[in-house]
């Protein structure tokens, strides 16, 4: 006969943490639902072509929050224009963001985008992109902040 046990609260948090890490690794673009009136999406290791197509196809104003390496990948070969992208925020991982063109602004973390007063008056879509191990950790921290803020 199988022995049943009641998991402790800390066990449940560990299981939730592992599930979030697995989702970040296994999904291409992941929807997190609404937060502060914004539809929130995360994307770890986006391919250049799919990210361009996705940003072009989204029907509402987009706030793109990205690590500098993903942003550099998008801007490396040609200058792209995304009509629906209203703001671009960069979280620095290894590159200097001083030489980025356009209206990019630096953030210390992905979650800081929800504390910018002028953005709170508008609603739309937040797309968070990152790549690699560092990006995986940044997205993980971001999704934990989202889930803890909604509790």
Image (tube, rainbow, N blue to C red):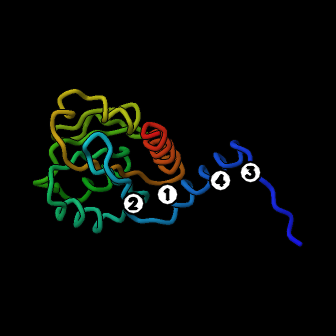
Q: Residue at x 20, y 49 (%)?
A: 62
Nearer the observer, 110 or 39: 39
Q: Earlier in the sequence, mark 3 or mark 4?
A: 3
Secondary structure of residue under mark 2: strand
- Residue bearing mark 4: 15
> Which residue ends up furthest to the bottom in the rendered image?
1
Asked if the residue under mark 1 is in contact with the one under mark 2, i.e. CB atoms within 8 Å, the reply is yes
Which one is earlier in the sequence, the residue at label 2 or at label 4? 4
Relative to residue 129, is residue 8 drawn left or right?
Answer: right
Eye-nearest disc, 2 or 4 = 4
Against 4, residue 97 (above or below) is: above
Using residue 68 as the reference point, say whether residue 18 is left or right of it: right
- SS at circle 3: loop
* Mark 4 Cα shell of 10 Å, populated few (<14), some (14-19), many (≥20): few
Residue beneath disc 2: 30
Above or below residue 96? Residue 79 is below
Identity of the residue furthest to the left in this view:
83
Mark pair 2, 1: CA separation: 8 Å
Judged from the image, the secondary structure of the residue bearing numbered disc 1 is: helix
């Amino acid at each position: 006969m199988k022995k049943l046990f009641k998991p402790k609260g800390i066990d449940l948090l560990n299981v939730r943490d592992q599930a979030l890490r697995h989702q970040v690794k296994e999904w291409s673009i992941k929807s997190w639902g609404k937060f502060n009136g914004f539809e929130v999406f995360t994307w770890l290791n986006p391919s250049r072509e799919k990210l361009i197509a996705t940003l072009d196809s989204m029907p509402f104003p987009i706030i793109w929050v990205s690590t500098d390496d993903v942003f550099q990948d998008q801007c490396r070969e040609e200058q792209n224009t995304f009509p629906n992208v209203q703001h671009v925020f960069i979280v620095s991982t290894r590159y200097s963001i001083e030489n980025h063109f356009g209206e990019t602004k630096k953030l210390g973390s992905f979650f800081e985008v929800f504390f910018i007063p002028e953005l709170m008056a508008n609603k739309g879509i937040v797309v968070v992109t990152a790549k690699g191990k560092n990006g995986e950790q940044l997205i993980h921290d971001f999704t934990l902040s989202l889930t803890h803020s909604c509790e």
